Image: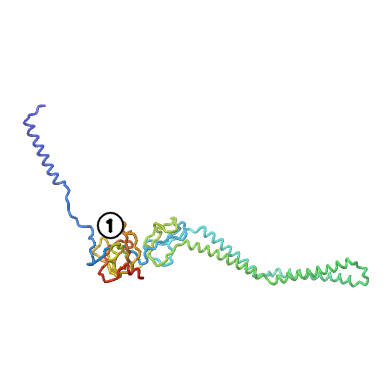
Amino acid sequence: MYRSPLLNKAIIPVLALGSLAYAVYATGVMRPRTASEPPLAAPPERAFSHAVAAVGLVEPVSELVAIAPRVPGWILAVHVAAGQTVKAGAPLFTLDSTDLNAEHALRVQAVHVSEAQLARLKALPRPEDIPIARAAVDEAKARLEDARSKFERAEAMADHRAVSDEERTQRRQAVAREEAAVAIRQAELDKLLAGAWQEDIAVADSQLSMARAAAARTQADIERLTTRAPMDAVILRLTARAGQYAPTGILEEPLVTLGSPGPLHIRADVNEQDVPRVMAGASAVAMVRGAATDRINLTYVRVEPQVTPKKALSGYAQERVDTRVMQVIFKVTSPDVSLLVGQQVDLFINNDGHATALAAQAWSR
């Protein structure tokens, strides 16, 4: 197809001018623009002219108490809920005790058997046995009289040749045997009337005590399966569930975490380079993250003398993870403050230079 050179000279410049105009427009509209945006929450501001900044964690006065069972087993029932206030000794959760219940029933039955054996010994002699023993004594005495009568008749004969020496000896021995038989029957009667031997009663009594102790031990083992609150506390966290296996020892995630009700403490991590600037008895102010305008007044409680690796990180890029910190405990004194255990706060500790350094105060106790 034939095109005029004049037409080509007109179209190409027009397209070039259109492309240039679009490039200028796209560059002005699509280029990134910078604009300052206000922060989501106001950053914390220094509360004192001379202050030491620190990061703190909210904790109860008793600190966090991690609960674990004394023996391992399967959880049968959980008796509390998170946020519930419990009294000291209140059950928290109970492990399965099927095998111990069966053993306890066996121990209790052994106690009943031992009690019956002791009662039987103390009830001796049986009234039915006494007439039988007396009759046996009377029978032995009758045989003795008969043997004596025969022996006396043989001795009384005028002619000793009427009874041989052998028969006379047999009758004498018969008398001796019957006398011994009477003595045996009489001794048996006396033994029966005396009742049980005191030593036998003592042995039976000891066996009863052992059976009761074994039953009490099994009952104690059953009681150990119920984990109870060691103090008046609030259930801060509950991970125990019915049917779950509960191991003993230090758990990575405790089954129940407790804390004392009442005022809260804040555990502040003071960086090791700031330790010399913190004074004993210094006041402090805390600010909850996200609400930096609300200041919480704190009073000094104590210091933990050991410097430990820092665990509560603030999240700042310039923060060193190998920093060691000294922990200072403060008490929340501001009324009507809404804080949660485990919440992280920013602290400013007053450093007016008129008190004893914490390091010296910690070692002087």
Horizontal side of 103 relative to 178 (left or right) equals left
Q: Which residue is mark 1?
A: 319
Question: 303 above or below 18?
Answer: below
Give the percent coordinates (x, y) of residue 187: 74, 70
Residue 255 location, quadrant:
bottom left
What is the secondary structure assignment of the residue under circle 1? loop
Query: Residue at horizontal 86%, vertical 70%?
Result: 151
Horizontal side of 247 relative to 144 (left or right) equals left
* The one of 219 and 28 positioned closer to us in this rendering: 28
In this view, the residue farthest toward the top is 1
Residue 278 location, quadrant:
bottom left
Residue 51 location, quadrant:
bottom left
Q: Amino acid at mark 1?
A: Glu
Q: Is residue 178 at least partly visible in the picture?
A: yes
Q: Residues within 10 Å of mark 1 (few under 14, many from 20)?
A: few
The quarter of the image holding the N terminus is: top left
Give the percent coordinates (x, y) of residue 179: 80, 70
Give the percent coordinates (x, y) of residue 39: 21, 57
Give the percent coordinates (x, y) of residue 217: 53, 64
Horizontal side of 45 relative to 203 (left or right) equals left
Q: How is the image coloured?
A: rainbow
Query: Residue at horizontal 13%, vertical 42%?
Result: 23
Q: Is residue 131 at least partly visible in the picture?
A: no
The quarter of the image holding the C terminus is: bottom left
